[in-house]
Amino acid sequence: MKLAGRQSAADNSVNGGERRTAVGELAEAFDSALFLRAVEQCAMRLRGFLDDPEIKGLDLIEPAVLMKAARELMTSEKTEIAAFDGGRLHRIVDLYLSTGIQVHSPGYMGRQFSGTVPLGGLMDLVGSIANQPSSFYEAGQLPNVAERLMAEELTPLIGWDTETSAMVTTSGGSMANLTALLAARNRAFPGIWARGVAGSGGHPAVALSEDAHYSVDRAVGVLGIGAERVVRLPVDDSGRIRPELVGPALDAARDRGLDVFCLVASAGTTSMGSFDPLAELAAVTRPRGIWLHVDGAHGASLLVSPEQRHRLAGLAEADSLTWDAHKMLFVPAPCTLLFYRDGTAARGAFRQRASYVFDEEPDVYSAFDSGDRNLECTKRPMIMPLWTLWSVYGPALFARKIDHLCALTSQAHRMLDAEPDFTVLHEPESNILCFRYTPDGLTGADLHPVQLDLRNRIRADGRFFISKVDIAGVAALRVVLMNHRIDAGHLALLIDEIRATGNQVLRERAARDDKDGIQP
Ligand SMILES: *Cc1c(COP(=O)(O)O)cnc(C)c1O
């Protein structure tokens, strides 16, 4: 055996006679000409998807059926690298597009993620090929700079000083809420990181609205605070915290020995899109030294609109803000921005010893790292679609769309309110509206199951995708208008469809009750 033989990948004698070399075999999967053709064909399909004029919501498929269809698209080749099969790729893309909620169709009115601005998605493709995970400057230079630039653009809208505040991106609003609560907890209980909750020298507790997003309750659990140490704040009929009851609730909690360190308000509740009265809440939390976290996952984007930003009046007094750009800024999910009024509070918790990433003394480069403010290490450079759209179109793109969606939701409110067999549950404050189908005689115990049944049948019909939410324990129908292509005609069609489906549901229930001999 030769000691220092020059071994190149092209050296067939090393790789076994006439067999293709490993590098040769890999070449096709990394071939740029083939990639270009695949992109062109995929883009044509995406164009058809974007331009599809049909009103459709979701084609809900039984998982077993979809499993089978998807399995058939998998190559059976297990030992060699299978040759590229364009047809297979196209069938995968077609299946992907056709089985999703049709977020670009006017039939989509159900969830808080949106039909993205297509260029935002294109930037995600660029990021996926360039692959620059963004917690550390050296691994994602432009993404880290873009984060700073977006912070400079957005922080003044919150009312904070860009110099002393901080912003990080997180994979979703749930992660941002957890991160903010962690920072709040660690500021209030400086020993807790080392000694744990039991050794914190207090009884950490948080105050939450009855209508807070479930991710906040989850964060409370993850942080070891305990569900029993949640102080629930009562809400009004629109789901807004009643500020006059907050002071007494906090005093009562203190008398029970609880140390409430954080109050979480919602700027845009998930169920009704209502805004908690931030200025009044801050007037209660500030003198008590309680951190005010604003969960603006849904509604913080209204800050971009001069017409709508009054909904968040008082936000400048808060300590942290969760802002999902993948909701009302119309970029691919996830892209969440977490802001801290005091940038130093963002750090404390996260300087673990890890000599491979954290420098002892930050230099001009590592000063741009966000790894020391973030639970995540490798994360998507999720700012790039947002920053690119902002750079190309400016903020008015977002403001116009938000204004339009809010106006459209008010129109939906007027239309439903004029229908005698519908009950609208609140005056919309953003683009979410909750209502029930309530024809004569439908009351009490029947109200809940009929709305549920209705929602599931509408979804199964596949034309409109709407959601449901329990309000005061009773199911309601909910629309989230994310698509500017929806117009009054589509809303009228939805109302007709709900009425027709609702009557069907009621007829079937009556027939069943007759059969069971139930007297009305
Ligand atoms: C959507 C939402 C969340 C959760 O955010 P994700 O990005 O889905 O993790 C949290 N809070 C509110 C108010 C929301 O609307």
Image: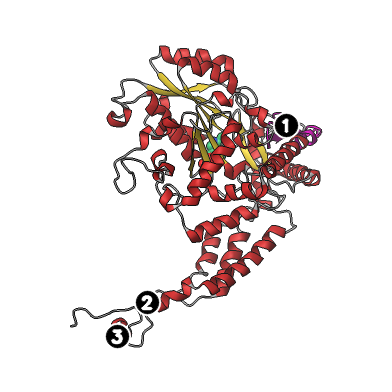
Q: State whether label 2 is within 8 Å of ligand 1.
A: no
The magenta region covers 412-437
Q: Is residue 211 left or right of residue 182?
A: right
Q: Which label belongs to residue 22?
A: 2
The answer to the question of whether label 1 and label 2 lie on touching residues, with beta carbons closer than 8 A, is: no
Tell me which label, 2 or 3, sits earlier in the chain.
3
| Residue found 59% across the figure and 67% down from its top | 39
Disc 3 marks a residue whose amino acid type is Ser
Closer to the camera in the image, 220 or 446: 220
Q: Three-letter amino acid code at disc 2? A: Ala
Point out which mark residue 424 bears: 1
In space, the residues marked 2 and 3 are separated at their CA atoms by 13 Å
For ligand 1, give the image quadrant: top right
Task: Tell me how far mark 3 sits from mark 1, CA to CA.
Answer: 77 Å
Q: Quadrant of the N terminus?
A: bottom left
Left-right relation of 173 to 16: right
299 in relation to 142, above or below: above
Q: In this rendering, is residue 511 above or below 224?
A: below
Q: How crowded is the residue under tag 1: few (<14 C-alpha within 10 Å), some, or many (20+)?
A: many
* Local crowd size for mark 2, using a 10 Å CA cut-off: few (<14), some (14–19), many (≥20): few
Q: Position of residue 443 (x, y in %)?
A: 70, 30
Q: Earlier in the sequence, mark 3 or mark 1?
A: 3
Local secondary structure at mark 1: strand
Residue nearer the viewer, 111 or 3: 3
Which residue is under mark 3? 13
Residue that appears at 61% across and 60% down: 97
